Image: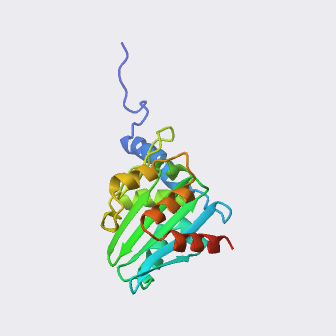
Amino acid sequence: MGVFDAEDAEPFDLEDDVEAELDEDDEFDDYDLEDASEDDIDLVVAAYREDGKPVVVPLDFDLANDLDELIRQLSRLPGDSGADGFVSIAGEIFVIVRARGRMVEVLLSDATAAHDWPLARDVLDYLGEDIPDEDEDSYPVGDMEMFAASGLRGFELEAIATDYDADSDECLERIAAKLKIADEFAAAAAAFDD
């Protein structure tokens, strides 16, 4: 039986192993998703009420890639009680943001879209939600009760959000109809495409 010689032993560094593990985890966090292009973006519009009347306006394409900037822009609108932002990307996902003073509520129609679109990743980060596995089934995340005071109850909003057979811009049109801003929404969506 040989004698153990510490000088001949390979050094064992726990710190190196931990760093290697962290690098593997960071690899996904640092993975740079490509921004949605103008061709990918179906619409970015904001809705608010001014003197009680609904106003819906098209917003800039770039806001479909940056949740923080979208929230900032919504906060600047002159709504009586804040503003709502609606984004649809590639007919696949939609994001809704309600900005009322310091209160911000968000909804993402499909959490698994965080593997494809920066805005979806931003929403999960904002909500403190983990990015789901790529093979996980689609599911919405966020505040389903955001329009409850306007008559659109959480279970109805969830039913629309989980209708994955419909295009995401069509889902937003259905939500707009429930909020009684269908005509204004359609006009802003059409202006967005121009």
Q: Is residue 14 above or below residue 92?
A: above
135 lies left or right of 189: left
Residue drawn at x 47%, y 64% as measured from the top left: 177
In the rendered image, residue 70, in percent from the top left (x then y), is placed at: 48, 72
Q: Nearer the viewer, residue 89 or 51?
A: 51
Q: Quadrant of the N terminus?
A: top left
Q: Nearer the viewer, residue 105 or 18?
A: 105
Choose top left, top right, bottom left or bottom right for residue 191: bottom right
Residue drawn at x 43%, y 63% as measured from the top left: 178
In the rendered image, residue 159, in percent from the top left (x then y), is placed at: 42, 49
In the rendered image, residue 79, in percent from the top left (x then y), is placed at: 40, 82
Choose top left, top right, bottom left or bottom right for residue 14: top left
Choose top left, top right, bottom left or bottom right for residue 101: bottom left
Q: Is residue 99 above or below residue 139?
A: below
Q: How is the image coloured?
A: rainbow
62 lies left or right of 132: right
Count of numbered tags: 0
Q: Is residue 80 above or below residue 137?
A: below
90 lies left or right of 6: right
Q: Quadrant of the C terminus?
A: bottom right
